């Protein structure tokens, strides 16, 4: 397995010269002052649950002034936060960046308190009358109505203020601990008689090596490394889930899933329909896993967990990073010149941090920075998988372009809809690659796509079951590392079934995945994104011109309506199991073709 040793790093200098620069220090100090001044404004208007009665005209005037101030401050906070994250996520040993992040979290906590007060106030006003009287409220109508409903799930103001302050030394601190420990974790790996110590992110990339003995060695070394820090990570998990359960109960939510669906802008009916369709697709994914095991010649005919990402087929393309960039831009151009020019701009302006290295966070992500700009983190290894990942993350960045003219309150896109553009862009890349592929290359491309779909449908289902079980048991007491491993193994058996060797699963996936250490049920939105994106792609194939004229507007509106309403724009009913089954049928067709090619 070859890694990318010399590759572009993202450029943060367009924003500030450095973390130590006078420009950054001035903006940081100004941000603190602006937050304090916004607090003075809310105090002046007595914003909160006990705000004095006002005429509709007075309410509209106060709302406009406060909302403009909130949006302006949030946009500035976004840039400073992203700038600091640009250093923390690429080198967690950067003590200055860590200190600035901690300091900014205090400012963010103050802003969160102000938002909480605004939500409480909106819970007391006639929001429909407000929307009629205020153009600002009308343009933020979804956020206003959502805040009005959310106010029913608020504790008293003193309790909410205390919760915001304690969060910094509670779940925020636990999540930061997880990120720091996992990004700095180094693994001793022996391959071919040579021993080396490398970052966990590099070890996990060995899962894509063509040599099974190398994959097995990396897997064993990875599990051993997780076992060395599992007490720390279990404490993080218990702390975060315990805090979440306490606050959910105090705020009157029936379950973590009810709150997660509200945050995701979708109903439980839609979630249940999707999860039911996913469960019915598990036998098809097991067909794919069995076919892959046969093609790889795995003894016993069952993949181990460490075989799931093994390369299959052969490609005449090396997929070095520059080739990946060129291919993604070319294929984006088949959809629109705007999408291609956007990709080329992201390369030209050095938005992307490409290669794995010590202290860098694992995986991949995209973060918005300023206006229509983003920064993308990869841990690129030459393979079609990472070409697809590049397209995926650039899809997120394109989504940010489409939302650039929206205010922060209008941009509050839930995870369910945040995956729309990324999955769509992945699909463009896959379709383009298949058009000119030889049978062996087609096998490689199909396998990469199915590998991703299996992760998003089957593995996400396992994570969903795991988190549900953790929440249920955490109500009684803390869970030990061993119990978390047992629950993880159980959930993998429930979903992968006989598609994997039950004696070679990944009991420490709860430690490896950062999603458990943030918002509750961060998992199912990825499945939503895949299947919703496939549904949209089918609409594009049916009516390309009509689709293009509406698609960017859909992306710009993902924080301004619920998922069901946005789906109806394209004739999609997300509360019907039939829609999810139709999207999964696209995957089934790929599995059928994959089985045929492997024979």
Image (cartoon, helix red, strand yellow):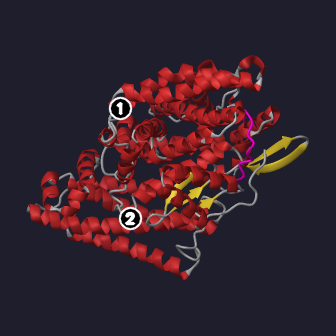
Identify the residue at image location x=65%, y=22%: 596
Magenta part mainly helix, strand or loop?
loop
The answer to whether 452 is drawn above or below residue 496 in the figure is below
Q: Secondary structure at mark 2?
A: helix
Q: Which residues are magenta?
A: 311-321
Is residue 152 visible in this depiction of the protein? yes
Instruction: Report the front residue among 237 and 91.
Output: 91
Local crowd size for mark 2, using a 10 Å CA cut-off: few (<14), some (14–19), many (≥20): some
Local crowd size for mark 1, using a 10 Å CA cut-off: few (<14), some (14–19), many (≥20): many
Identify the residue at image location x=55%, y=64%: 345
Residue 99 is a magenta residue:
no
Is residue 481 visible in this depiction of the protein? no
Alpha carbon separation for disc pair 1 and 2: 31 Å
Q: Position of residue 527 (x, y in %)?
A: 48, 36
Residue 253 relative to residue 597: left or right: left
Q: Position of residue 486 (x, y in %)?
A: 61, 27
Label annotation for residue 270: 1
Pick the quarter of the image with the N terminus: top right
Label annotation for residue 458: none
Residue 246 relative to residue 442: left or right: left
Residue 319 is a magenta residue:
yes
Q: Position of residue 496 (x, y in %)?
A: 59, 24
Does label 1 or label 2 sit earlier along the sequence? Answer: 2
Residue, disc 2: 74
């Amino acid at each position: 397995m070859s890694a990318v040793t010399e590759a572009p790093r993202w450029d943060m200098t367009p924003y500030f010269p450095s973390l130590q620069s006078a420009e950054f220090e001035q903006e940081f100090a100004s941000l603190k002052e602006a937050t304090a001044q916004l607090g003075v404004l809310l105090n002046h208007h007595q914003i909160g649950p006990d705000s004095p009665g006002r005429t509709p005209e007075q309410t509209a005037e106060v709302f406009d002034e406060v909302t403009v101030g909130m949006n302006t401050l949030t946009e500035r906070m976004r840039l400073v936060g992203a700038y600091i994250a640009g250093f923390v996520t690429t080198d967690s040993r950067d003590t200055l960046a860590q200190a600035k992040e901690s300091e900014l979290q205090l400012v963010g906590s103050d802003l969160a308190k102000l938002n909480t007060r605004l939500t409480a106030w909106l819970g007391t006003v006639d929001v429909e009358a407000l929307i009629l009287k205020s153009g600002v409220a009308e343009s933020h109508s979804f956020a206003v109505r959502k805040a009005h409903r959310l106010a029913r799930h608020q504790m008293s103001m003193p309790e909410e203020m205390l919760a915001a302050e304690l969060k910094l030394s509670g779940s925020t601190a636990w999540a930061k601990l997880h990120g720091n420990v996992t990004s700095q974790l180094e693994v001793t790996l022996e391959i071919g008689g040579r021993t080396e110590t490398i970052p966990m992110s590099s070890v996990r990339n060995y899962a894509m090596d063509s040599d099974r003995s190398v994959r097995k060695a990396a897997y064993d070394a990875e599990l051993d490394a997780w076992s060395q820090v599992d007490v720390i990570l279990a404490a993080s998990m218990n702390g975060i889930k315990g805090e979440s359960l306490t606050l959910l109960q105090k705020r009157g939510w029936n379950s973590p899933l009810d709150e997660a669906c509200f945050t995701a802008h979708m109903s439980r009916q839609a979630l249940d329909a999707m999860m039911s369709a996913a469960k019915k697709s598990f036998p098809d994914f097991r067909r794919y896993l069995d076919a892959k095991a046969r093609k790889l010649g795995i003894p016993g005919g069952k993949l181990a967990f460490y075989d799931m990402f093994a390369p299959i087929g052969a490609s005449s393309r090396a997929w070095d990073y520059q080739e990946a960039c060129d291919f993604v831009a070319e294929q984006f151009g088949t959809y629109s010149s705007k999408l291609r020019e956007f990709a080329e701009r992201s390369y030209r302006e050095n938005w992307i941090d490409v290669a794995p290295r010590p202290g860098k966070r694992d995986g991949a992500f995209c973060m918005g920075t300023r206006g229509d700009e983003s920064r993308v983190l990869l841990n690129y290894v030459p393979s079609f998988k990472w070409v697809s990942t590049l397209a995926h993350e650039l899809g997120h960045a394109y989504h940010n372009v489409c939302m650039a003219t929206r205010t922060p309150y209008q941009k509050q896109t839930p995870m369910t809809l945040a995956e729309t553009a990324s999955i769509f862009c992945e699909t463009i890349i896959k379709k383009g690659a298949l058009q000119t592929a030889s049978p062996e290359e087609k096998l490689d491309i199909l396998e990469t796509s199915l590998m991703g779909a299996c992760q998003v449908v089957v593995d996400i289902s396992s994570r969903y079951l795991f988190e549900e079980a953790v929440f249920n048991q955490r109500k009684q007491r803390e869970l030990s590392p061993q119990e978390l491993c047992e629950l993880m193994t159980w959930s993998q058996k429930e979903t992968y079934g006989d598609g994997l060797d039950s004696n070679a699963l990944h009991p420490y996936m709860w430690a490896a995945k950062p999603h458990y250490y943030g918002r509750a049920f961060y998992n199912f939105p990825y499945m939503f994104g895949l299947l919703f994106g496939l549904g949209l792609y089918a609409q594009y194939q049916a009516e390309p011109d009509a689709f293009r004229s509406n698609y960017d507007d859909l992306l710009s509106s993902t924080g301004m309506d619920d998922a069901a309403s946005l789906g109806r724009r394209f004739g999609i009913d997300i509360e019907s199991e039939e829609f999810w089954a139709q999207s999964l049928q696209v995957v089934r067709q790929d599995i059928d073709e994959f089985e045929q090619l492997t024979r």
